[in-house]
């Protein structure tokens, strides 16, 4: 694919059934559980996302140095896996990945009995692992407002530890649905646990070799909700989604009701059709931060003002997503700003504003920037730079947009 693509403004009704990509969040958890259960579990419908391909490759690799590329989930899950192993190994990633903090997880694992050291700056990858020693403790206390991937990584290795593990979560718990996703998947593969208040306990147990079919990706579904909201008219069916989902990003159903999209579930499908919009929404993204960029863009174009909290983790993703979005939305005349500590407001583009076309959006080497900005083509000609970044989570994205009748050409 070229360095940029042009998406022509799409006026007609968007009407199609989308064979969504599978959830990389579920896929990557299931792959680690499968490995911890000695490869007995049978997994179906694994994600084609590069992150999942990377996870699968590294779990089967005998190399001393493992490269996660830009996959944050893979870095955290593999860190827990390697820390409790019996070999000397190393792990690294892209320059950006080596700027994303890992200290809380690494130090927690060291407290358990791991032997992890830093090969570069303290608290950041790359990491060196020596064989796991004697388990020093079965109780850890960690902040609840850190990345849920740290907590999930610890939980998945917990039943394989000689003494099991009890986690005490301090303060407010962020991304709770992702923690519950992990525990629900562990339960499917035979692991009993308790999550009461802010305490999660997992006794020593063996993973069972059960089968599991990965659900479609609710994060990927969010872009179709945005297309449905911004289209002149839409009737879109998304396949492989559960009304009662393990994925926190299923919150897009409720959020998008305020942005003009009604959801109707039928078996494993959800149908998106128009409904009335609200002029202002208050949203807490604490449990679903990956939806934020999609909602920013949709609200900016639809003329809906937003007041938001729970965006803290966006600063340490593939890019500083709040800063990047503020820059890109300004090209539409919209304004995204932090008005007080932890509180963000979005002022949408003024009604009737003239916009120079095509609008060129940068991706910042971030898959969610590219996919969140693309639906603006329902209103304007759009150029997306670095379109190949979508391979990280939704490789079929541009092909699926073409299925919707959107004209895409290389620049």
Image (spheres, rainbow, N blue to C red):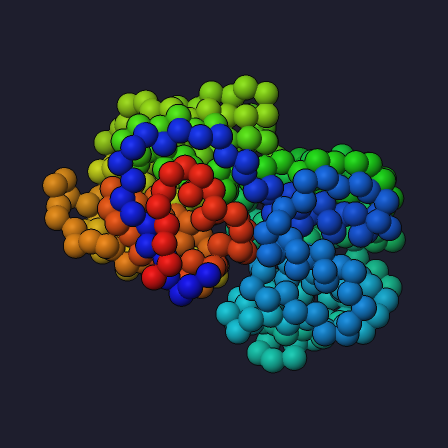
Q: State the residue at coordinates (78%, 65%).
A: 61
Q: From this viewpoint, which residue is outermost toward the bottom?
A: 120
Q: State the residue at coordinates (50%, 25%).
A: 270
Q: Inspect this view and state whether residue 191 appears.
A: no
Residue closest to the eye, 241 or 88: 241
Count the marks: how many? 0
In the displayed structure, would residue 38 be above or below residue 2? Answer: above
In the displayed structure, would residue 121 be above or below residue 171? Answer: below
Residue closest to the eye, 383 or 211: 383
**Is 53 situated left or right of 344 in this image?**
right
Q: Looking at the picture, how far across and down is residue 310, in whole percent? A: 42, 46
**Is 91 situated left or right of 9 in this image?**
right
Q: Looking at the picture, how far across and down is residue 352, in whole percent? A: 12, 41
The image quadrant that residue 123 belongs to is bottom right
Q: Looking at the picture, how far across and down is residue 158, in whole percent? A: 77, 50
Q: State the residue at coordinates (86%, 64%).
A: 134
Q: Inspect this view and state whether residue 239 appears.
A: yes
Residue closest to the eye, 351 or 10: 10
Q: State the residue at coordinates (59%, 31%).
A: 240
| Quadrant in the picture for the C terminus | bottom left
Residue closest to the eye, 280 or 31: 31
Q: Looking at the picture, how far across and down is residue 117, in whole percent? A: 70, 75
**Is 297 situated left or right of 74 in this image?**
left
In the displayed structure, would residue 151 be above or below residue 68? Answer: above
């Amino acid at each position: 694919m070229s360095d940029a693509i042009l998406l022509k403004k799409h006026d007609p009704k968007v009407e199609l059934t989308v064979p969504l990509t599978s959830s990389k969040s579920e896929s990557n958890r299931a792959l680690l559980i499968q490995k911890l259960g000695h490869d007995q579990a049978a997994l179906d419908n694994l994600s084609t996302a590069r992150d999942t391909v990377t996870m699968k490759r590294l779990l089967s690799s005998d190399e001393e140095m493992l490269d996660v590329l830009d996959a944050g989930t893979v870095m955290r899950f593999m860190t827990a896996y390697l820390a409790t192993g019996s070999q000397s190994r190393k792990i690294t990633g892209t320059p950006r990945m080596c700027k994303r903090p890992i200290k809380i997880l690494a130090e927690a694992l060291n407290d358990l009995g791991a032997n992890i050291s830093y090969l570069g700056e303290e608290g950041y990858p790359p990491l060196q692992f020596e064989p796991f020693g004697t388990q020093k403790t079965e109780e850890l206390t960690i902040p609840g407002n850190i990345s849920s991937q740290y907590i999930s990584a610890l939980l998945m290795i917990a039943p394989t530890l000689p003494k099991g593990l009890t986690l005490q979560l301090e303060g407010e718990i962020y991304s709770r649905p992702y923690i519950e996703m992990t525990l629900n998947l562990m339960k499917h593969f035979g692991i009993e646990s308790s999550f009461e208040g802010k305490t999660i306990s997992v006794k020593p147990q063996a993973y069972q070799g059960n089968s599991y079919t990965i659900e479609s990706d609710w994060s990927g579904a969010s872009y179709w909700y945005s297309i449905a909201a911004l289209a002149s008219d839409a009737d879109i069916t998304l396949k492989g989604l559960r009304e009662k989902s393990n994925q926190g990003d299923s919150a897009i159903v409720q959020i998008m009701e305020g942005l003009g999209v009604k959801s109707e579930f039928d078996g494993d499908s959800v149908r998106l059709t128009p409904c009335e919009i609200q002029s202002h929404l208050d949203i807490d993204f604490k449990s679903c931060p990956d939806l934020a960029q999609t909602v920013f863009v949709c609200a900016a174009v639809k003329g809906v003002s937003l007041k938001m909290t729970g965006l803290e983790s966006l600063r340490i993703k593939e890019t500083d997503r709040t800063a990047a979005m503020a820059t890109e939305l300004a090209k539409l005349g919209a304004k995204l700003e932090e008005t007080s500590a932890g509180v963000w407001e979005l002022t949408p583009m003024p009604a009737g504003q003239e916009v120079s076309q095509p609008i060129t959006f940068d991706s910042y080497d971030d898959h969610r920037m590219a996919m969140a900005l693309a639906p603006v083509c329902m209103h304007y000609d759009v150029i997306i730079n670095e379109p190949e970044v979508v391979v990280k989570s939704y490789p079929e994205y541009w092909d699926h947009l073409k299925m919707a009748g959107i004209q895409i050409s290389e620049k």
